[in-house]
Amino acid sequence: MYLYDLHFAGACLEIVEFQRSQLSSLSPCPFYLKFGSKSVQKGRALVSGTFPYACQRPKQYPASKKPGEYPQNMDLPPVLPKKKKKPYPIPFKEIQKAARKDKKLAERGVEKPLQPPKNGLLVPELIPVAYEVLDAWKLLIKGLAQLLHVIPVYGCSECSEVHVAHSGHNIQDCKGPRSSKRRGLHSWVKGSINDILIPIESYHLYDPFGRRIKHETRFDYDRIPAVVELCIQAGVDIPEYPSRRRTNPIRMIGKKIIDRGGYVEEPKPWRAVDPSSSSIIDLDTCGACERFPPPSPEDVPIIAQETMNAHETVQTGVTKLMKKYTVKACGYCSEVHVGPWGHNAKLCGEFKHQWRDGKHGWQDATVSEVFPPNYVWHVQDPKGPPMRSALKRYYGKAPAVVELCMQAGAQVPRRYKPMMRLDIIVPESEEASLVA
């Protein structure tokens, strides 16, 4: 294939031929060839015909985006349909490529090369991150429990909608079982800390590379927050939730473990002892509002800012830990499992669970599945009139923790401002029809 570059000098047309090896060194030509019907006077005669002529391309300036800059407005992630499997975080072709590579090594009897933490050893540089995330998790629960005494939160009794304001909104988007009788309006009740910080729990494993959890043995394991379990496997030592620390790496050929250092008897679950007499009660949201008293009015903005900072620390730290440590999530429901592979408990009741006999469809988890943001409507005036469906397109959204802390006096991080649509003025109901 050849490329022809056209140059015009008066009425002459020069064609220059380039080989393939010369194409990479060429810069884009600012001119392009165009044919048009024109009348040209040559001497005293008038000649009509189709003549080629050169036109200059308009200059295109690349959109420069500095680090830390965000667009003016940004849409929220799309809501995934429940009657369909979640998309894979890693492209399926890459998963197949890695599986074929492991299969070739297994056929030749070559061990699979594993790096920490895939071989059961800890990553030393991530141990301080795990402790920082756990401390921020405790501070986040404490701050939310205190702010809920001051900032009212409402939740729909028929669906998962949450609203942070002095009254519920009137947006008709309820998907509950009896929403048709209310014409899509929500049935608001007083919310709790679990409406703001969605509890995502996981089984605690003494040895993540040991025996798998079966459906019959699922009650032999503790259920703790997935963030806490991730920190424990990343190096945090909690006496109530012990974890096996290996000194020798495991060895694998393909999908088979050939050396795991033997099976160790796992300790009994901690739930047999009263949890209120230990420090693990600070790791759970259960009864948090009763444990912490209401704050004084002058301390509310300080607590709100500390809670906002703790939320950002947890999200950033979980992102760092999940880049190394494996976390699995069901492709159909909200179940999460921290470990190299999922459990075998038959607890999935979502789309086509009969075909899978209730087993989960495990795949790699995302940060939003381990630490869900739980987006709510951003209220510009919490004490003003309730939101309406007619003005829905002018409203923005934000994570529930961010919206709660912002109404309590905290500064909003820059990355949430585009989705909150702070620069859009909400018109009146009679003005909405006049807006283009």
Image (cartoon, rainbow, N blue to C red):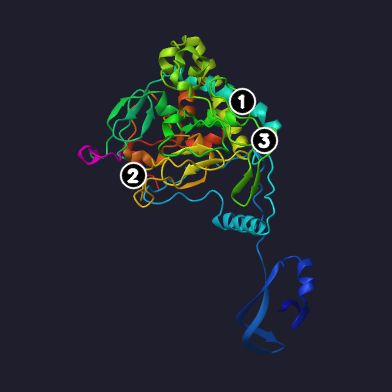
- Quadrant position of the N terminus in the picture: bottom right
Badge 2 amino acid: Ser
Query: If you read the primary sequence from the N terminus, does the residue marked by circle 1 or circle 3 appear first?
Result: 3
* Element under disc 1: loop
Q: Position of residue 303 (x, y in %)?
A: 52, 16
150 or 246: which is nearer to us? 246
The one nearer the camera, 187 or 273, is 273
Nearer the N terminus, badge 2 or badge 3? 3
Read off the residue under disc 1. 236
Q: Which numbered disc covers residue 433? A: 2
Please give the name of the residue rendered at 43% of the width and 27% of the height, measured from the top-left corner: 196
Would residue 229 appear left or right of 185 to someone viewing this image?
A: right
Q: Residue at x 27, y 36 (%)?
A: 185
Which residue lies at the image location 47% right of the left edge and 9% below the top edge? 296
Instruction: State whether residue 354 appears in this view.
Output: yes
The amino acid marked with disc number 1 is Val
Q: Name which quarter of the figure residue 327 lies in.
A: top right
Magenta-span inclusion, residue 179 = yes
Residue 408: assigned label = none
Mark 2 touching mark 3, by CB under 8 A?
A: no
Q: Nearer the viewer, mark 2 or mark 1?
A: 1
Residue where numbered disc 3 is placed: 121
What residue range appears in magenta?
174-182
In the image, 259 versus 111, the foreground residue is 259
* Residue 196 magenta: no
Q: Secondary structure at mark 2?
A: loop
